[in-house]
């Protein structure tokens, strides 16, 4: 009977797998190391909420890994160890990869939701004038109330 060389899934260490991801390894590379398919590793990382959160954190770290590699490539160009045209291709690829793993921080373009209010400028101006009038009216009412109280004190004091 042939014994399987596969690494048992129960023995996979979440921290080890996430560290490999953070160091730049793909799921296919990790699967090859543990003699499993990339899909099996993906399912392991999505087994429960704890695994999913650790996986997402590792992906963000992987983005930083690629950003560090970009810095190293730039230094190689500055030191004359690498031709600029070769480095440009490598840097562009790593920029693209890094932006996918941490888009809010490492992307050149930020994709977000923009909400548009249907109010026109005239409606906004009218509302602002109404707010100003309401504040003035409250202030006048407060001043009149203060004068009435002052007059009552003068009348009651005489």
Image (cartoon, rainbow, N blue to C red):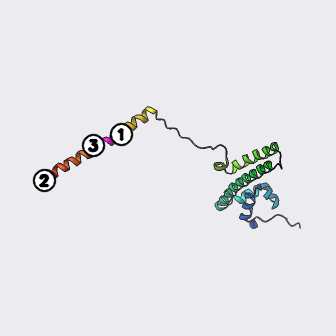
Earlier in the chain: of badge 1 and badge 3, it is: 1
| Precedes in sequence: disc 1 or disc 2 | 1
Q: Which residues are magenta?
A: 132-136
User: Was residue 114 drawn as part of the magenta stretch in this picture?
Assistant: no
- Local packing at callout 3 (Cα closer than 10 Å; few below 14, some 14-19, many 20+) is few
Return the residue at label 2.
Answer: 156
Q: Earlier in the sequence, mark 2 or mark 3?
A: 3
Q: Say which element carries label 1.
A: helix
Where does label 1 land, which residue? 132
Percent from the top left, x then y, of residue 157?
A: 12, 54
Q: Main secondary structure of the magenta part?
A: helix
Towards the viewer: 149 or 32: 149
Q: Which residue is mark 3?
A: 140
Q: Position of residue 14 (x, y in %)?
A: 71, 64
Residue at (82, 60) in percent of width and height: 33
Quarter of the image that includes the N terminus: bottom right
Q: Which residue is most to the left?
A: 158
Specify the quadrant of the image occupied by residue 18: bottom right
**5 relative position to 24: left or right:** right
Q: Residue furthest right?
A: 1
Q: Which mark is residue 51?
A: none
Task: State how far apart marks 1 and 3 are (Cα).
Answer: 12 Å
């Amino acid at each position: 009977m042939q014994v399987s060389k596969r690494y048992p899934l129960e023995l996979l260490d979440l921290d080890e797998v996430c560290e490999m991801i953070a160091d730049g390894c793909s799921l296919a590379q990790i699967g090859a190391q543990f003699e499993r398919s990339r899909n099996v590793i993906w399912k392991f990382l999505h087994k429960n909420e704890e695994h999913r959160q650790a996986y997402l954190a590792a992906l963000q770290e992987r983005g930083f890994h690629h950003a560090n590699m970009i810095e190293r490539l730039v230094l190689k160009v500055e030191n004359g160890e690498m031709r600029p045209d070769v480095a440009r291709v490598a840097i562009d690829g790593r920029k693209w990869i890094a932006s996918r793993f941490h888009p809010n921080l490492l992307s050149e373009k930020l994709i977000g939701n923009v909400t548009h209010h249907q109010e026109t400028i005239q409606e906004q101006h009218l509302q602002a004038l109404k707010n100003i009038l309401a504040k003035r009216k409250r202030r006048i009412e407060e001043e009149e109330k203060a004068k009435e109280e002052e007059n009552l004190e003068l009348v009651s004091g005489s």
